[in-house]
Amino acid sequence: MTRVHVTYTGTVQGVGFRFTCKEIAERLGDVAGTVENLSGGKVELIAEGEKKEVLDFLKKIEEYFATYIKYTEIEWEPAEGKFEGFTIK
């Protein structure tokens, strides 16, 4: 299991970003975590799961919002196992 902490910058608020992340996570089924809007127009995402599933999750987000995301900051961390499902904050 792994954990990823991602901050997206660009036009990522007001475009359904958080709801789409939740939908993608639920479709994949093996990714848990949270997504929330931050001040300054950024979005923070924390996700846990098997590395392959988490990478697939991030790839689908990047593909779906390719024209909206200008910069992605990614930090990999050990999984903490504290999430149940995927939620929007």
Image: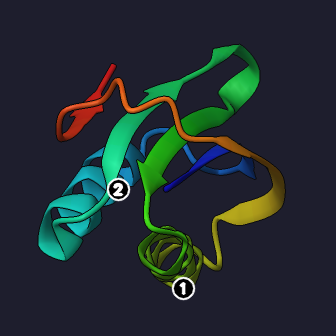
Q: Which mark is residue 63?
A: 1
Q: Disc 2 designates what residue?
A: 21
- In the rendered view, does 26 fall on the left or right side of 75? left
Q: Residue at x 65, y 51 (%)?
A: 11
Is residue 79 positioned above or below 65 on the image?
Answer: above
- In this picture the colour scheme is rainbow
Q: Is residue 42 left or right of residue 47?
A: right
In the rendering, at what x and y percent does residue 29 appear?
Answer: 16, 66
Residue 6 at least partly seen: no
| x and y, in percent, of residue 43 in the image | 60, 36
Q: Position of residue 38 (x, y in %)?
A: 62, 19
* Disc 2 residue type (three-letter): Cys
Q: Secondary structure at mark 2?
A: helix
Whether 38 is drawn above or below 20: the answer is above
Q: Which quadrant is the C terminus positioned in?
A: top left
Q: Dividing the picture into quarters, in which one does residue 84 lie? A: top left
